[in-house]
Image (cartoon, grey):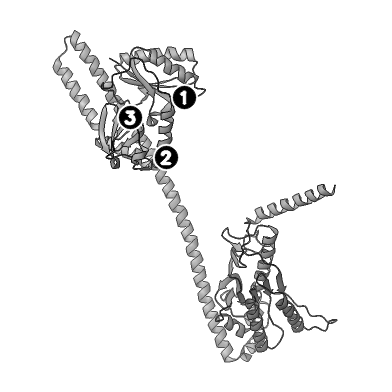
Amino acid sequence: MRAAESACIRADELHAIARYSESVRGVAIVPTAESCIELRGARHPLLADHERVVANDIILPAATALVISGPNAGGKTVILKMVGLAAWMVRSGIPLPVAADSQMGWFDPVLCNLGDAQSITSSLSTFSAHVADLSAILKAAGPTTMVLLDEVAAGTDPEEGAALAAAVLESLATRGSTVMATTHHEPLKELATRHPQLRSAAVGFDLQTMLPTFRLIPDLAGPSTALAVAARFGMPADVLARAQSFIPEASRDRERLLRELHAERSAAEEHRLAIEVELVKQRATRLQMEEQRDEFEARESRELQAKYRDLLGAVVRARAELSQLEKQLKHENLSAEMLHEAEQLVDAAAHVIAMGSPVSNIAQTKNAGQLKTRQPRLEELSAGAKVMVPKWGVTAEVAEVAARGEVRVVAGALRAWFPLQELRVAADGSWARRNEATAKAPKPKLSNALPAASPRVTPVRVDSNTLDLRGQRVDEALDQVDAFVDQMLRGGERAAFVLHGHGTGALKQAVREHLRLISHISDSSPAAAEDGGDAFTVFWLGR
């Protein structure tokens, strides 16, 4: 029972942690070996789900003390508590409401002096209680210690209190502790700007609205603005004017200088944040434009390829019609001049889209632009491998590889030697996978195969020369294949395609075996990748 109860309690804890992390968009932090603080975009754990909460970057190396100054009610103590909670949350495995690139060391222990611990029964004044706590902290401090001090050494003479605070912070940093302290002591603010182990930061204050911004500004001492805060909380104007007259001239000058510096830094920080927001918007706009451009280019490429294939198919059909005319010329009284004129018209159309023509080059360039390629290495190539030949605009098969670095390729009736730099393969390695699959596949035994020296057209798949058998039963499909072959023969086609798909493979196998038995078919094979690959079978018709 106890084990079950413990398991339920643990499950409830994990569920609560998960719900909290989801509500604040928490990030799980793995503690670092170094006792440093690097919280970016940090929000107070109890305020993190509020939309208007201000996120801050808190960066502090190990063995360093951060002195935070600025106006009352400006958020100094909130920052101390936020960092202390973050340290314990990291140790407990609870995600923090921070940016993903944040880091936090493993702090043990976390020591703090927050609030007023005066006690009448213990004869402790406010200052006495602070000093007692500071003494205990100094005894316990070490390299893995985090120390949080609110209004360090307050409650006594400002000059002596500032001197004591400086000595305490320096001693803690020397012990290797990571320290954060708030103060209104002017000497301590000044010391933090030049001491090697102390750093300075200020909480923001809008001098126009006389309201705190709750933003932490690094490397800057903040004015206390006590009189401004008093005015905001209803202090009479005559009392404030009289208080202003009691402030020494040197102090007024120092406060004025701090306010000017603070205003400049705040303006610079706001400007930086505005630039970052604008950059994010610009990046989003650029990505959107790039996506639209890529989509447009892909659509344009598909349309161009379709039109190119249709044109090529039209030329193939026109040549078949010429062949028919040539046969009729032997039996009918047709003018040879008429046939010659028709041949010239078809040749002119074919020239426009022939390999190497402007139309062919544009189509192939558009198509190649969708695929990243690279030059192949000589050791990667062997007989039967597929390569792209940009000069021809086709995918060809390697016939022979010469030691001198040249490759003989075959594409239909085209055969030529090319240097490696004029060939391309897919940069993602997909060509190698296709080649490997092709090498392992059993070579079909073709009946009535053409002699090696006999030229064979390079087919282009279009709707008119493709038979779609998907979803058909085998016996029905084979009847359609016979009718389709007769149709292609009557039309004078030299090559055609059968779309059988993959499925279980039964229809594919039956179609390919049946094609081998047809005497009018001189050769057949799986289609090239650009024509649909193994889902199609291409066959060539002999005259």
Q: CA distance from mark 2 to mark 3?
A: 27 Å
60 vs 98: above or below? below
* Amino acid type indicated by mark 3: Arg
**Quadrant in which residue 95 is drawn:** bottom right
**On the rendered image, what quadrant is the C terminus found in?**
top left
Q: How many marks?
A: 3
Question: Which label's residue is closer to the chain start, 1 or 3?
Answer: 3
* Amino acid type indicated by mark 1: Gly
Residue 286 horizontal/vertical position (percent): 43, 53
Nearest to the eye among marks 2 and 1: give it: 2
> Mark 2 sits on what residue?
429
SS for dot 2: loop
Residue 289 horizontal/vertical position (percent): 42, 49
Question: Which label's residue is closer to the chain start, 2 or 1?
Answer: 2
Residue 73 horizontal/vertical position (percent): 66, 74
Q: Nearer the viewer, residue 120 or 257?
A: 120
Residue appearing at x 42%, y 33% in the figure: 436
> Mark 3 sits on what residue?
309
Q: CA distance from mark 2 to mark 1?
A: 24 Å
**Quadrant in which residue 406 is drawn:** top left
Q: Nearer the viewer, residue 139 or 519?
A: 139
Question: Which label's residue is closer to the chain start, 2 or 3?
Answer: 3
Q: Nearer the viewer, residue 364 or 23?
A: 364
340 vs 400: above or below? above
Label 3: how many residues lie within 10 Å, few (<14), some (14-19) or many (20+)?
some
227 vs 404: above or below? below
> Is residue 468 left or right of 265 when viewed as pictured?
left
> Mark 1 sits on what residue?
501
> Is residue 8 left or right of 236 when viewed as pictured?
right
SS for dot 3: helix
